[in-house]
Image (cartoon, helix red, strand yellow):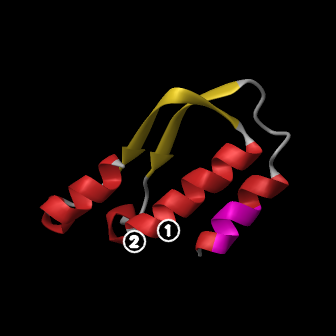
Amino acid sequence: MIKSICREAELRNDYLKGQIDTIYFGGGTPSLVPAEDLQFIIDKLQSIFKINTDAEITLEANPDDINKEKLIAWKK
């Protein structure tokens, strides 16, 4: 799944022009995706698109899936 998301971004590298101000992880339950995989996606997006250094990154989460360790990892 992670590789497919990154491949889709590569295929659409000419789709977005200018800087990206928002990245949204939603649909399904992205809070169940390991933080390392989310970071991998963000790193890949940064290598393809121009992402604003203070871009808003939002993650849809089920409150039952949230714990202190996840919050720390997501903040990074």
Which quadrant: the N terminus? bottom right
**Residue 23 visible within the image:** yes
Q: What type of secondary structure mainly makes up the magenta span? A: helix
Percent across and percent down for residue 60 are 33, 52
Question: In percent of the image, x 31 and y 47: which residue is there?
Answer: 75
Stretch in magenta: 3-7
Q: 50 left or right of 30? A: right
Question: In percent of the image, x 72 and y 48: which residue is there?
Answer: 47
Query: Is there CB contact under 8 Å for labels 1 and 2?
Result: yes
Quarter of the rendering containing residue 33: bottom left
Helix, strand or loop status at disc 2: loop
Q: 23 left or right of 35? A: right
Q: Residues within 10 Å of mark 2 (few under 14, many from 20)?
A: few
Q: Which mark identifies residue 34?
A: 2
Helix, strand or loop status at disc 1: helix
Q: Circle 1 sits on which residue? A: 37
| Residue 71 belongs to the span the image colors magenta | no
Q: 66 left or right of 39? A: left
> In this rendering, is residue 68 above or below 37?
above
> In this rendering, is residue 9 above or below 35?
above
Q: Which three-letter amino acid code belongs to the residue tagged 2? A: Pro
Task: Give the camera-side residue of 60 and 40.
Answer: 40
Quarter of the rendering containing residue 57: top left
Q: Which three-letter amino acid code belongs to the residue tagged 1? A: Asp
